[in-house]
Image (cartoon, grey):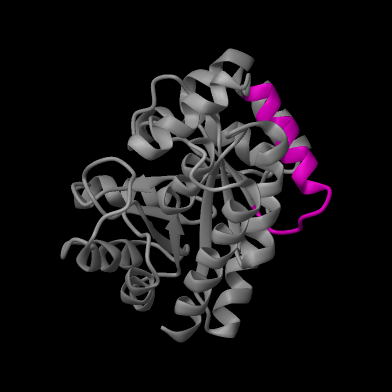
Amino acid sequence: MSRIGPMFSEKRIRGEKALITYTMGGDPDLSLSLEIIKTLAASGADLIEVGLPFSDPLADGPVIQKAGQRALAADSGPEEVLALIAAARKDLSLPLVIMSYLNPIFQIGIDEFLRRAAGAGADGLIIPDLPAEEGEEIRAAAAGYGLDLIPLVAPTTGQKRLEKIVSQASGFIYCVSVTGVTGARDNLPVEVIPLLERVQAATKLPVCLGFGISTPEQAMLAAPHCDGIIVGSALVALVEEYTRNKINKQEMLKLMAERVAALKLALRES
């Protein structure tokens, strides 16, 4: 059994919403990437998504695309990210989820990749380019290794397809706030709340909102309508500032910790 369900159950008992953070595995290098994961956990993240760098990402905006390029330039691939997760798992008890596209998984082989992911201590996977209609093999294999396969639902997802997607899901439902790629936005679209309501009516799984959330104010706005929020680009952007020598390593980790703590406080006050 993965750690995801118990984490959300505990949150619901406490009347809290989960803070999910994203970081690219191996960005800017494996050593610092491990420090970033530990910083996110220590600052209040309830679940951490670890991206598997891929050269042709479908859903990533400019900030995360650059992070993937930095990680690839530092020779971070599937094997290295799995080793990174295993290293993080030695010290962390919170759920760790791999966000990957299909090709890197195919490189190793579906069953072998999932076996290694479970062995490394991962709790689930998010695969943005996995169609609901073609995911049975991965779903069955993931379930066999105790991994949750978390689907994405977009504002454009029709009702019948939404019901099919959530019926196959485990862990939580990842609601995408916009019809574009990842990245911080100034405002959340008005379609977000109706989308969350539609998904919640179709499933008992936790429903979380990502893509576009970057500030405590946005977190407070979304929190009453979902079980958790997902923040990625606003945190990954700090790594970019570090790699461009705008801030040093300690400043980067300090700012990241402060942003996570501020988001956590906003969720508690929402």
Query: Image point 35% across, 67% down: which residue?
Result: 200
Q: Front-most of 242 and 128?
A: 242
Q: Position of residue 169 (x, y in %)?
A: 47, 49
Quadrant of the rendered image containing residue 13? bottom right
Q: Who's the residue at 52% across and 59% down the image?
A: 20
Taking the magenta stretch, the answer to whether it contains residue 161 is: no
For this orientation, the residue located farthest to the right is 90
Residue closer to the observer: 16 or 251: 251
Residue extending farthest to the left is: 190
| 119 sits to left or right of 128 | right
Residue 223 at what x, y percent from top left?
A: 38, 74
Question: Does the magenta segment cover residue 86?
Answer: yes
**Residue beneath the point at 47% across and 70% down:** 263
What span is in magenta?
A: 78-95
Q: Is residue 268 above or below residue 28?
A: below
Q: Position of residue 98 (x, y in %)?
A: 58, 39
Q: Is residue 67 above or below residue 209?
A: above
| Residue 82 appearing in the image | yes
Q: State the residue lying farthest toward the top.
A: 107
Q: Nearer the viewer, residue 25 or 178?
A: 25
Q: Is residue 195 above or below residue 149?
A: below
Residue 195, given in percent of the width and then of the height, sits at: 24, 61
Q: Which residue occupies 54% across, 30% down?
A: 138
Per the picture, the main secondary structure of the magenta-coloured stretch is: helix
The answer to whether one can see residue 1 in this image is: no
